[in-house]
Image (tube, grey):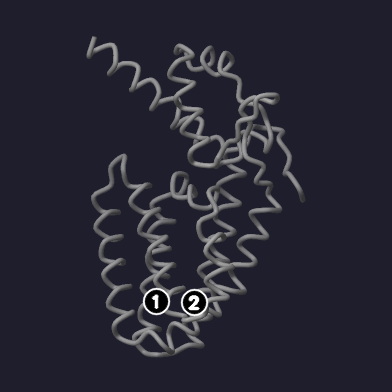
Amino acid sequence: MNNIKTIKASAAEKAYEVLRQRVVGGGYAPGEQLKEEHIARELAISRTPVRAALKRLIDDRLATADPNRGVRVAEWTDFDIEETFDLRGLLESHAAELAARRGGAALADVLDDLNGQMERAIHKGGDELPERLQENNARFHRAILDASGSPRLHSILTSLIDMPIVLRSHFISTLQDKLQSLSHHRDLAAAVRAGDGELAKQVMRLHLRVASHRFRRQREALKPVGAGTDGS
């Protein structure tokens, strides 16, 4: 009985990983229906683990469920993602400028610690690396946002930083991408320690601009041949 449960759990994990990468990478169009039977046949597994994988996608807000329309890919179009990065570039660079002026050595110590954790996680690697980096990255950006001392920025940016499709970008990034992101984080920490608001602002803007181009490249590489862009 335990062996059967283990096999089912493994199949559900496999299905989830495949579906998650396709959703994040743009392999499925926004709003496209995810049919249990079709996916089970394609992956050569039963419908039970596929059903479990779809539930996880819904929990992650990467898919939606409707009694009349079934399970569908959350409608994050290319335009939605580009707009999100543009807004973050404008607002989060301002937050970084404020944080560098107000955070001082205490904030710089927090950022340096998070960067150390990120570096160790990258070197360790493993299947859990994307989850670790996702959490670490969110903590890093939230620390800067909190230190900005602006309730208005906090209210607007929290939902953008936690946007599901962007959070999941760590699952399709390369090692070079991860190291480049870490380098930007280190530059931000250095700007904060120096109290240089203008430098922090420019580094954050560069960081998010590069992330936008990188994410677009990753999604294009994962799209099926002949698939177009959405919302552009």
Q: Nearer the viewer, residue 156 or 47?
A: 156
Disc 1 crowd rating (10 Å Cα; few below 14, some 14-19, many 20+) is: some
* Above or below, 26 relative to 104: above
Disc 2 crowd rating (10 Å Cα; few below 14, some 14-19, many 20+) is: many
Q: Is residue 166 left or right of residue 69?
A: left
- Residue 120 seen by the camera: yes
Q: How many marks?
A: 2
Give the image location of residue 21, x and y in percent. 50, 37
Q: Is residue 221 left or right of residue 191?
A: right
Q: Identify residue type, mark 2.
A: Val
* Above or below, 132 relative to 33: below
- Residue 205 seen by the camera: no
Give the residue pinned by disc 1: 187
Which residue is pictured at 49% across the width and 77% down the height?
A: 203
The quarter of the picture where residue 2 lies is: top left
- Look at the numbered disc 1 and give the secondary structure of its residue: helix
Q: Is residue 128 left or right of residue 218?
A: left
Which residue is pictured at 36% across the width and 73% down the height?
A: 186
Kindly report the distance in space between the C-alpha atoms of the residues bearing marks 2 and 1: 7 Å
Residue 203 marker: 2
Which residue is pictured at 38% across the width and 68% down the height?
A: 183
**Residue farthest toward the top in the current orientation of the protein:** 1
- Look at the numbered disc 2 and give the secondary structure of its residue: helix
Q: Do tag 2 and tag 1 residues touch (Cβ < 8 Å)?
A: yes
Give the image location of residue 45, x and y in percent. 44, 13
Which image quarter holds the N terminus?
top left
Give the image location of residue 54, x and y in percent. 51, 28
Label located before the other in sequence (2 or 1): 1
Q: Identify residue type, mark 1.
A: Asp
Q: Nearer the viewer, residue 36 or 225?
A: 36
Residue 67 marker: none
